Image (cartoon, coloured by chain):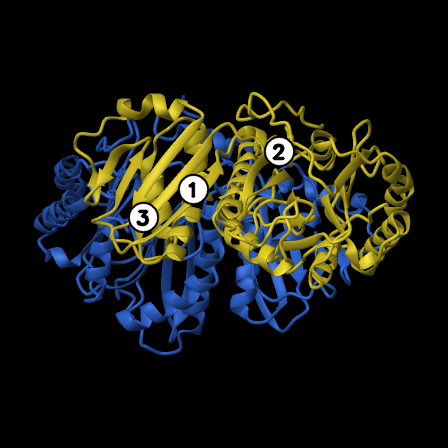
Chain colours: A blue, B yellow
Amino acid sequence: MPVAMTTSPLAPSSYPELPKIAGVRMSTAQAGVRYKDRTDVLLMELCEGTTVAGVLTRSKTASAPVLACRTALKAGKARALVVNSGNANAFTGSVGVESVTRVTEACAGVLNCPPSAIYTASTGVIGERLPDEKITQALQTLAGTLSENAWNDAARAIMTTDTYPKMATRTVQIGGTNVTLNGIAKGSGMIAPDMATMLAFVFTDAALPAPVLQEMLDEANASTFNCITVDGDTSTSDTLLLFATGKAGNSAADTTDFRRALHEILHELALHVVKDGEGAEKLISISVTGAASDKAARTIGMSIANSPLVKTAIAASDANWGRIVMAVGKAGEEADRDKLMIAIGGVVVAHHGAVDPDYRESHIEAHMKGRNITIDVDVGIGSGKARVWTCDLTHRYIDINGSYRT
Amino acid sequence: MPVAMTTSPLAPSSYPELPKIAGVRMSTAQAGVRYKDRTDVLLMELCEGTTVAGVLTRSKTASAPVLACRTALKAGKARALVVNSGNANAFTGSVGVESVTRVTEACAGVLNCPPSAIYTASTGVIGERLPDEKITQALQTLAGTLSENAWNDAARAIMTTDTYPKMATRTVQIGGTNVTLNGIAKGSGMIAPDMATMLAFVFTDAALPAPVLQEMLDEANASTFNCITVDGDTSTSDTLLLFATGKAGNSAADTTDFRRALHEILHELALHVVKDGEGAEKLISISVTGAASDKAARTIGMSIANSPLVKTAIAASDANWGRIVMAVGKAGEEADRDKLMIAIGGVVVAHHGAVDPDYRESHIEAHMKGRNITIDVDVGIGSGKARVWTCDLTHRYIDINGSYRT
């Protein structure tokens, strides 16, 4: 029994209009990889000279496209990206590797470029053969319908259980020259640390060498996609790629603004992935301070963010802070129980190892019933800090994941 | 809106009758700690000379009774155990410590023994002051109604969201003398590795010194309670205690049978905790072989057992083995994707890095619809192995945990 996909209550009221990026064209098709009556293949064409950086899942059972991306990234050059939804081409053995090869070769043939410059990404069901012939057959048509203005279509074609397309854009200057960044992403289950999103792609017309892109991407990823979780399950397909066409023709001057814009785009897309987490009804922002290190703070934050008991309580608008105490305790990181401070919605509920005597649940009742829940925890040890994001755990998560394949 | 507590479909059809254990007497009371119209305090009286061993939660935010047990265990002697349900006396600061002191002193007064020989355990809501006066007031009556035959009542008095009492018994010989072991336990949420059960108590009339008991308990715990999970959340209150009255008067001869019986009792109780996991409808046994070490095998097993995607699929009787691949991949332990073998219900579904060409979902459809799901995974690296147990993730888990405090 398929679950009706009503749009997440945390979806934005309107979507940004993404501008053209010189050197980037795109088209989408209904190839019927798995879904019917919706687009499921995206071709992004990139001009010659495009550099690329990427962050890929650390899963030990990574998908065939992820392995191929890892190899291609060594050269740092890109001419196209082919994405399909509905089938992850993961755990498909040598057949899966051959599928990737056929898709990249077909795409290279159509675009007249080396196969090593073609990147692919697949998400959806694991363990089923990718019907790559449906994708290769679509490529000729896709190449003939490329447009600079189909960003919304692109964001929709890569969706699986996502209930809304995820897009973000920024325009900033590098050395006095305007450069634009456009990002698209998809979620929405199997989202966890160690590269959280399943797929996110950022395109810019900036001229930046691959190693510089890579360094910027790693840094921005660490505090955005790597700090979100929906269900603690790490995908076999997580792929984040940043493509730079160089068409803006900027000098390699001060990149501070670009770096900030990249961080903002990843942050925005990462939060969209959480907001569209399977069954999500509330966005939960967790800030941890006073930890032994930033890493320890993130571990504690993720322990809270992945706790089913915390997430089910929040789903029920219950300020059950005792479960936050539990989650801090189980994280395995140093914490001083008698200095622990917990605030919800900015209201201190517990400190000095016990409930605040002035705290009343009525103080945060309205906050708990809202869509955006904030939790601040100070563990009283050092100066390590981190911020992580998750969503609540609702009946719909179970509905969606009990019926995904049927 | 409280959730109606229907008995777990995995509950046994009948409960064992636990025999007397010389040197152990017990009584229960309705003290009104939190619940109405049910027993919520248990007093277990132990004869002079009783030795004790224990395993306690590794949580950094352990409850006040856990800290007191840790101190008392150093002496290895016990005269009584006082357990209450409904309130965990966790994260209650110095007030919580004073509550434990008042309970142990009152109990010592009533039984005329040193307070250091009194063990306490509390489970239930975190962060609320324990109304210890209700317990201390009940103690005089409890001491006046002690019986050798109230094991079923004892197992019931310690329940919180448990839907059935958990008991196990064995009689074996040490050096030709009969010795009996009785165990009781409670679950049923906030169950995770690092001492999984919330509370389990084993009583025996065997004569064994505390260090021997401790060594046996650690060993048996490692492959039983430490290998179960309901939701990956580690309790602040996890307590496993083993009391030996010495009344059997056995020699300190061969303890092989006793050791095996202890393991069996812990195994049986641990499985009861999983079977009565919040919302559980299926028991999932996961066997991991071929790992780099036993520890790695357990980590991989727990990664599968704690995956909400695996657990929701199984709840829906869906043999979604791709999610098992994902969980193996995210565990962070070495695994050879191309040698990975996965069997469900004894049927090989995947091997050599891909789905078995002969596998059809119909082969395991009946198995998936049953109550006992078995998953075997070989990760193709070495000879490390482990077995872990969990339950499925159902709507009732969310119902129970969204309404526990209301």
- Cβ atoms at labels 1 and 3 below 8 Å apart: no
Q: Give the percent coordinates (x, y) of residue A14.
A: 49, 41
Callout 1 amino acid: Gly
Q: Chain of mark 2?
A: B
Q: How many marks?
A: 3
Q: Chain of mark 1?
A: A
Q: Quadrant of residue B33?
A: top right
Tell me the residue that label 3 is attached to: B289
Q: Give the percent coordinates (x, y) of residue A272.
A: 47, 47
Q: CA distance from mark 3 to mark 2?
A: 30 Å
Q: CA distance from mark 1 to mark 3?
A: 28 Å
Measured along the vertical axis of the image, is residue A360 above or below residue B363? below
**Residue lying furthest bottom:** A253
Measured along the vertical axis of the image, is residue A312 above or below residue A5? below
Residue found at x 29% / y 30%: A35
Measured along the vertical axis of the image, is residue A255 above or below residue B213? below
SS of the residue under disc 2: strand
Q: CA distance from mark 1 to mark 2?
A: 36 Å
Q: Give the percent coordinates (x, y) of residue B3.
A: 67, 27
- Badge 2, how many Cα within 10 Å: few under 14, some, many 20+? many
**Most foreground residue, B257 or B251:** B251
Q: Quadrant of residue B74?
A: bottom right
Tell me the residue that label 2 is attached to: B166
The quadrant the C terminus of chain B occupies is top right
Q: Is residue B290 left or right of residue A112?
A: right
- Cβ atoms at labels 1 and 2 below 8 Å apart: no
Residue found at x 71% / y 37%: B158
Q: Is residue A290 left or right of residue B176?
A: right
The quadrant the N terminus of chain B occupies is top right
Callout 3 amino acid: Thr
Tell me the residue that label 1 is attached to: A189
Callout 2 amino acid: Lys
